[in-house]
């Protein structure tokens, strides 16, 4: 049986500041098919177009040309707020993705009720609260006993773990992870990445993860995409991906004329 295409990008282009001295062609004729259940790691140097690609999928800005199709629907002209109910996203900055002045359980309620018509937030029911406790317990951070604590008081790792939980609580068509462990210390980053793999595998989530860490890019997921100067220059999956080494990726960068930065080497 043919694999289902969850996300399709056709000839997607984006140029910032066109016609000015600051003109930057960020995406150049991007063609990409993401299959249901794929976990794709995306790697590339500074300015390769990784975050621009993710922002284009989210609708953060309009693309100049091409089409974006999600689960069979053309969302190219759909505004960002309407795409949000189909997408889960975790940002690099732990301060994003949550409402810091709201309690943990209030943040979870917003995520859990995503896509439902609401005006003022209705009261959190006993059943919902029990569900939130159960979900938080799996983080092993003790947050299940701190439901009424303001999220702004949590550490970066706690917030990022909570954001990941919120992004996946209502199974999204597509989960987008934008270097979501880059701002964390190594120990916390390892924990959050392990939790990411556990949740995505358990829920069979179609996932795109941007990372600067070559070892994580090779180890995580079933597919790896390398970008350079707004183009996809390498797309590998399955056994071929598993056989890759950091040296292989470095060689690919050198072949493409890409600039290898310290973050990629030391990540």
Image (spheres, grey):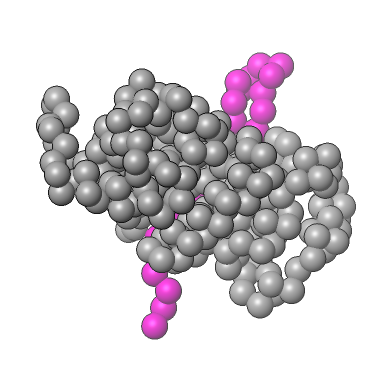
* Residue appearing at x 84%, y 55% in the figure: 250
On the image, the x and y values in percent for residue 226 come to 69, 54
Q: Is residue 119 left or right of residue 189?
A: left
* Residue appearing at x 14%, y 44% in the figure: 126
Q: Is residue 59 left or right of residue 119?
A: right
- Residue located farthest toward the bottom when viewing the structure as drawn: 1
Q: Can you see residue 140?
A: yes
Kindly indicate the quadrant of the structure image that contains residue 82.
Answer: top left
Q: Can you see residue 67?
A: no
The question of residue 239 being in magenta is answered with no
Highlighted range, magenta? 1-26
Q: Is the residue 193 above or below the residue 120 in the image?
A: below
On the image, the x and y values in percent for residue 118 come to 14, 32
Asked whether 70 or 91 is in front, the reply is: 91
Q: Is residue 83 left or right of residue 246?
A: left
Asked whether 65 or 182 is in front, the reply is: 182
Q: Is the residue 234 above or below the residue 129 in the image?
A: below
Kindly indicate the quadrant of the structure image that contains residue 24.
Answer: top right
Q: Is the residue 180 above or below the residue 73 in the image?
A: above
Asked whether 168 or 173 is in front, the reply is: 168
């Amino acid at each position: 049986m043919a694999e289902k295409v969850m996300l399709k990008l056709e000839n997607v282009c984006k140029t910032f500041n066109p016609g000015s001295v600051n003109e930057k062609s960020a995406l150049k004729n991007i063609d990409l098919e993401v299959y249901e259940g794929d976990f794709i790691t995306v790697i590339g140097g500074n300015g390769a177009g990784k975050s621009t690609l993710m922002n284009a999928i989210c609708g953060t800005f309009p693309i100049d040309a091409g089409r974006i199709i999600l689960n069979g629907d053309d969302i190219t002209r759909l505004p960002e707020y309407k795409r949000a109910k189909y997408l889960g996203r975790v940002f690099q900055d732990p301060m994003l993705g949550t409402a810091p002045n709201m309690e943990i359980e209030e943040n979870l309620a917003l995520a859990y009720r995503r896509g439902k018509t609401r005006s003022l937030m209705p009261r959190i029911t006993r059943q919902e609260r029990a569900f939130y406790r159960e979900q938080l317990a799996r983080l092993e951070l003790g947050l299940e006993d701190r439901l009424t604590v303001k999220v702004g008081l949590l550490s970066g790792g706690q917030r990022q773990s909570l954001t990941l939980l919120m992004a996946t609580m209502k199974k999204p068509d597509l989960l987008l992870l934008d270097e979501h462990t880059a701002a964390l210390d190594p120990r916390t980053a390892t924990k959050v990445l392990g939790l990411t793999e556990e949740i995505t595998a358990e829920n069979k989530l179609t996932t795109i993860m941007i990372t600067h860490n070559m070892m994580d890019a090779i180890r995580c997921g079933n597919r790896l995409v390398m970008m350079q100067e707004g183009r996809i220059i390498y797309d590998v999956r399955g056994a071929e991906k598993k056989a890759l080494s950091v040296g292989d990726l470095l060689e690919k960068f050198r072949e493409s004329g890409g600039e290898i930065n310290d973050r990629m080497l030391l990540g």
